[in-house]
Image: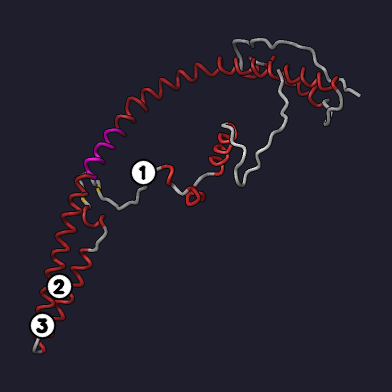
């Protein structure tokens, strides 16, 4: 048996020009209350075409109200968007972006310099380590007295110091300080650059790919005609549509 929850069609107005949002668009909120009242009368399970027809009509009215609300939303928001665009243009595009670009250019130049400085300083310290090691080996080979042995031991200590200096982290090799208190330093980082997309073992990246990205890829796969994918249930079903 069908249930009577039909509601009369009534096009929402365009609101008023003054007052709060709620006051200007009371026609929309009043209409929403009416549709919600009708919705509350819809049975949990549809049993006949008469009820289904009324459901379709109710869905159509909801679509119509949503369209009116979207139109009013756009009209209300546009002045704020335009003001926001002007603020963004002044601060973001006019000041912050040029500063970010300029700083990126400084970082590029500094990186090139610090690479050279690190390589040169590392080579210098490694050369000192080799010289200290050669001196220690010579002292050990020539040691014949206690005094000679003491010299050889001191040379080994110098080797250890030189080796520690040569193995220092890059930050210790390139750090500079400015008169205004700035500190420029550097660190080593690992990077990955794609050379062949088809050769990438995606299973190795599984833990680093967000579930939402995987689900988006599955939807694209199915939409493109994919019908079989291990670990995924691909099926055809019915989905209601209103117009």
Give how far across and how far down residue 126 sits, in percent.
Answer: 17, 63
Q: Nearer the viewer, mark 1 or mark 3?
A: 1
Q: Residues within 10 Å of mark 2 (few under 14, many from 20)?
A: many
User: Is 178 on the left-hand or right-hand side of 193?
Assistant: left
Labels 1 and 3: the sequence-earlier one:
3
Separation of residues labelled 1 and 3 (CA atoms): 53 Å
Q: Which residue is mark 3?
A: 141
Which label was assigned to residue 148? none
Separation of residues labelled 3 and 2 (CA atoms): 12 Å
Which label was assigned to residue 133? 2
Q: Which residue is mark 1?
A: 195
Residue at the location (13% across, 84% down)?
A: 150
Among the 4 quarters of the image, the one containing residue 235 = top right
User: Is 38 on the left-hand or right-hand side of 109?
Assistant: right
Kindly state the secondary structure of the residue where label 2 is placed.
helix
Separation of residues labelled 2 and 1 (CA atoms): 42 Å
Labels 2 and 1: the sequence-earlier one:
2
Q: Which of these two is toward me, 216 or 31?
A: 216
Labels 3 and 2: the sequence-earlier one:
2
State how many labels appear: 3
Q: Residues within 10 Å of mark 1 (few under 14, many from 20)?
A: few
Instruction: State which quarter of the image contains the C terminus.
Output: top right
Residue numbers of the magenta segment: 101-111
Q: Which of these two is toward me, 212 or 18?
A: 212
Q: Nearer the viewer, mark 2 or mark 1?
A: 1
Residue 72 lies in magenta, yes or no?
no
Q: Are marks 1 and 3 in contact (CB under 8 Å)?
A: no
Residue at the location (24% across, 38% down)?
A: 106
């Amino acid at each position: 048996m069908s249930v009577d929850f039909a509601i009369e069609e009534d096009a929402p107005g365009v609101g008023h020009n003054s007052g709060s949002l709620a006051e200007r668009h009371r026609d929309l909120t009043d209409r929403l209350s009416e549709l919600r009242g009708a919705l509350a009368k819809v049975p949990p399970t549809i049993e006949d075409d008469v009820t289904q027809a009324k459901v379709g009509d109710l869905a159509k009215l909801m679509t119509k109200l949503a369209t009116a609300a979207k139109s009013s939303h756009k009209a209300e928001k546009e002045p704020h968007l335009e003001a926001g665009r002007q603020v963004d243009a002044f601060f973001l595009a006019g000041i912050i972006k040029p500063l970010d670009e300029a700083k990126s250019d400084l970082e590029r130049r500094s990186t090139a310099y610090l690479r050279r400085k690190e390589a040169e300083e590392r080579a210098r310290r490694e050369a000192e380590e080799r010289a200290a090691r050669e001196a220690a080996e010579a002292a050990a080979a020539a040691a014949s007295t206690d005094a000679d042995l003491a010299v050889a031991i001191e040379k080994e200590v110098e080797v250890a110091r030189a080796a520690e200096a040569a193995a220092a982290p890059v930050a210790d090799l390139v750090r500079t300080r400015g008169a205004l208190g700035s500190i420029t330093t550097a660190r080593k980082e690992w990077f990955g650059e794609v050379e062949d997309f088809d050769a990438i073992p995606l299973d190795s990246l599984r833990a680093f790919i967000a579930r939402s990205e995987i689900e988006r890829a599955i939807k694209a796969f199915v939409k493109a005609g994919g019908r079989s994918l291990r670990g995924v249930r691909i099926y055809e079903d019915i989905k209601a549509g209103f117009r």
